[in-house]
Amino acid sequence: MWQRLEQTRSLEERLAEEAKRLREQAKLLPPGAVREAVLQKARLTEKASQMNAWLASAGLQPPK
């Protein structure tokens, strides 16, 4: 049914690569809505990477 894909790179590496790719793509676009949407996606991807790092940190405390 479902086939599990084994990742060779960490989630953080893949997110950083995607954000970089999106920023490079945005450089090639003219100013406007499409370019802003691509930059927004790059920012969200970077935030996801930061959240992942925070969740994986040793200092994370469970809610009380």
Image (tube, rainbow, N blue to C red):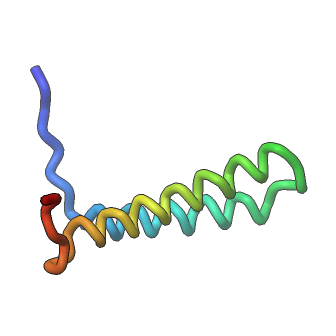
47 over 57 or under it: above or below: above
Residue 11 % position (x, y): 29, 62
Indicate the quadrant where residue 20 lies.
bottom right
Quadrant (top left/top right/bottom left/bottom right) for the N terminus = top left
44 over 58 or under it: above or below: above
Residue shown at 65% from the left, 65% from the top: 23
Q: Is residue 5 visible?
A: yes
In-image side of 12 versus 59 (left or right)? right
The outermost residue toward the top is: 1
Residue shown at 57% from the left, 63% from the top: 21
Instruction: From the viewer's side, name the closer residue of 39 and 51.
Output: 51
Residue shown at 24% from the left, 65% from the top: 55
5 over 19 or under it: above or below: above
Residue shown at 15% from the left, 69% from the top: 61
The outermost residue toward the right is: 31
The outermost residue toward the front is: 64
Residue 14 % position (x, y): 37, 63
Residue 52 % position (x, y): 30, 64
Indicate the quadrant where residue 2 lies.
top left
Indicate the quadrant where residue 16 lies.
bottom left
Residue 24 % position (x, y): 67, 66
Instruction: From the viewer's side, name the closer residue of 6 and 63.
Output: 63
14 over 57 or under it: above or below: above
How many numbered circles does the render carry? 0
Quadrant (top left/top right/bottom left/bottom right) for the C terminus = bottom left
In-image side of 6 versus 9 (left or right)? left
Q: Is residue 9 visible?
A: no
